[in-house]
Image: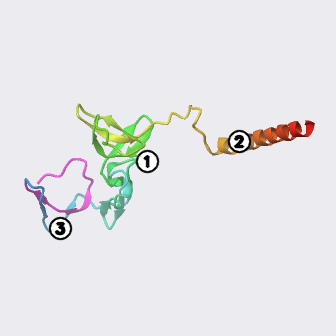
Amino acid sequence: MTAPSNVPNGVIDLVVKAYDDLDLETDSATVTLQMGAPCATADSCLTGQKCEAGKCFWDPPAGVLGDACTYNEFCVTGLCQQSDIGQFCTQNCVVGSSDGCPAMFDCIATSDTGGVCLPQDKGGGGCCSVDGRESNRSIWAHLGLGVLAFGFIVRRRRRR
């Protein structure tokens, strides 16, 4: 068996999985092999991997749909996709399907029929997009307008 070219040198746990036409699977026993020299630091491992006891490994996937990511193995779905607004954990979807992605995500085409769910681009320039600093300013603006309106009403009633 030949290892893929992107597999780093080091101690490797090998498990063979077999699937049938009903998607039933079975696993072999784990076999530990050594390919080249064991890793000494994470620098010799793939992106996001750690090195312990001569073995490169990733932490269990923790990224859910929409989380920022830098490599596929960070995401629970195994898909980390670059977009115009960043790189995110995503899932496959069918382009044009109304329920292909959860709310606040769009199905962006990656092939003729398939796509991935990516967060909707908010643009940041619209009148309704406010960050925390603008929210504080808008509270004071609304409060000021309210006091001004209250003063105007009280003044009109006193003149009568």
Q: Earlier in the sequence, mark 2 or mark 1?
A: 1
Say which of marks 2 and 1 sits in front: 2
**Residue 103 vs residue 111, the one in the foreground:** 103
* Residue 76 included in the magenta stretch of the image: no
Q: Quadrant of residue 118?
A: top left
Q: Earlier in the sequence, mark 3 or mark 2?
A: 3
**Residue 139 vs residue 125, the one in the foreground:** 139
Specify few, some or many for label 2: CA neighbours under 10 Å numbering under 14, 14-19, or 20 or more: few
Q: Identify the residue under disc 2.
A: 137
Task: Give the amino acid type for the residue marked by disc 3 in the picture.
Answer: Thr
The structure residue drawn at horizontal position 17% and vertical position 67%, both measured from the top left corner, is 30
Q: Which mark is residue 99?
A: none
Query: 56 left or right of 70?
Result: left
Query: 71 left or right of 150?
Result: left
Say which of marks 3 and 1 sits in front: 1
Q: Identify the residue under disc 1.
A: 68
Tell me which segment is drawn in magenta. 1-20
- The percent position of residue 61, horizontal first and vertical second, equals 34, 58
Q: Which mark is residue 30?
A: 3
- Give SS at disc 1: loop
Quarter of the figure that contains the C terminus: top right
- The percent position of residue 99, horizontal first and vertical second, equals 31, 42
* Residue 4 included in the magenta stretch of the image: yes
Specify few, some or many for label 1: CA neighbours under 10 Å numbering under 14, 14-19, or 20 or more: some
Distance from Cα at disc 3 to Cα at disc 1: 32 Å
**Residue 150 vs residue 91, the one in the foreground:** 150
- Give SS at disc 2: helix
Distance from Cα at disc 2 to Cα at disc 1: 29 Å
Q: Earlier in the sequence, mark 3 or mark 1?
A: 3
- The percent position of residue 74, horizontal first and vertical second, equals 36, 54
Task: Give the amino acid type for the residue marked by disc 1 in the picture.
Answer: Ala
**Residue 82 vs residue 102, the one in the foreground:** 102
